[in-house]
Amino acid sequence: MKAAVLLCPGAATDFHLEERPVPTPQVGQVLVRVRAFGLNRSELMTRKGLSPGVQFPRVLGIECVGEVVADPSGDYLPGQQVAALMGGLGRDYDGSYAEYALVPKRILYPFHSQLPWAQLGAIPEMFQTVYGSLHLALKIQASETLLIRGGTSSVGLLAAQLAQQAGLTVLATTRQAAKAELLRASGAAHVLLDGGQVHDQVRALYPAGVDKMLELVGTPTLRDSLTCLKPGGLGCMTGMLSESWSLPDFAPMEFIPATVGLTIYDSGQVTAPAAAMQDFIKSVEAGRVQLRIGRVFPLAEIGLAHQLIEANAAGGKIVVTT
C-alpha cells in the first residue's frame, strides 16, 4: 500500500510516499481501506513537531472515511462504510495518510451514503467539531446571538450555516473584506472585519453583548472575544488557527469577565453519537446543508495540500483521496 510518511518534523515538502505492507488487524482493531480524509490544522502542528508525545516516523491523519476490509471480531462486515476520527489516530499510531489504516474499533462510526468519497471525506472531524461546539459545549438555543471568531475556516463556515438554521443570529469575523459575501452566504447576519479586536463592532450591534461565542482563532483573540459576551454569556474555544496553544501568565480573574463562562470542545474527549453523523449526512444528501470543499488532492500531492491549508487559501475544507 502507499503511505505518506513523515520521517521527522519538517516542512510540507518533507512527506515521503512509501510502499508498505498492508497491516493485519489484531483484536480490537479494524482494517479500513481509506478512500478519503479531510485535512486538519492540528496535523500542521504535528508535522511541525508541536504536538507533544508524537514519535516519528509517523503517518499523520486524524480522520478518514472508507470501507471495512477485515474485523477479527466480526462486528463490522467487509465493504461496510465507516468513518474514523481522533482517539490517537495519526499521533499515537499511524493515521489516515495511506491507502489502508488500522483503526481501533472504538473510534469507528458506521454510516451509509451514496455521496462521493471526496464529499464524505470532508465530514467526520468537521461535523464532530461543529456539532460538539454548538450543541455539547455551547448548548445553543433558537433566538440567541452567536459570535464566530475565525468565520472563514471550514469549521466556521459550517458552524454559521448550522447555527443560522437552528434559529440563531450569527456574527462572523474575517480578516479579508473580500470574504464577506462567503460568510453571508453561509448564514452570517453580520460580518465583522477583524483587525485583532472586534469588541467595539460587536457592542455597536448589541450593546449588552452576545449570548454565545465560538473561538476558532485561538489564544491571541480569546480575551477580546470574551469581552464581546453579555453577562452570563458562554464562550467555547475550539480552534487554534493562530497555531498558539497556550496563554503566558494566565490570570483568570483578570482575563475572564465576571459571570462570563469559558469552556472548550475537543472531539478527542467528547464525541457526537453515530446517529447524529448519519443525520448530518442525510441533510447533505438532501441539499439542506452545503459542504464547502476548498480543493481535493490525490494522496501523492499531500505536500501541496499542506501548503494550501498553511497559506489559509483553501476557502473550505481540503480533502485528500486515496
Image (cartoon, grey):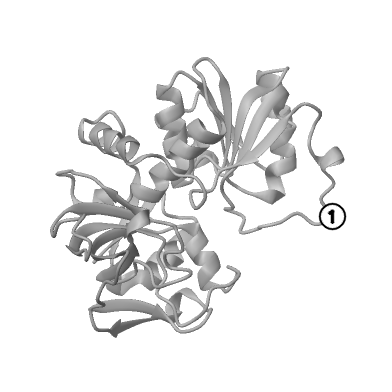
- Residue 70 at x, y percent in the picture: 18, 66
Q: Secondary structure at mark 1?
A: loop
**The N terminus sits in image quarter:** bottom left
Residue located farthest toward the top when viewing the structure as drawn: 143
Query: What's the residue type where badge 1 is placed?
Result: Asp
Q: Residue at x 61, y 38 (%)?
A: 236
- Residue 165 at x, y percent in the picture: 40, 23
Total numbered circles: 1
Q: Is residue 310 visible?
A: no
- Residue 104 at x, y percent in the picture: 35, 62
Residue density around tag 1, few if under 14, some if 14–19, many if 20 or more, within 10 Å? few
Q: Residue at x 48, y 48 (%)?
A: 267
The residue carrying mark 1 is 249
Examine the rendered structure and indicate whether residue 160 appears above or below residue 27.
above
Q: Is residue 226 visible?
A: yes
Examine the rendered structure and indicate whether residue 24 appears above or below residue 245.
below
Front in this rendered view, residue 262 or 108: 108
Examine the rendered structure and indicate whether residue 127 appears above or below residue 199.
below
Front in this rendered view, residue 269 or 206: 269
Q: Is residue 123 left or right of residue 71?
A: right
Q: Is residue 286 left or right of residue 202?
A: left
Q: Residue at x 44, y 37 (%)?
A: 131
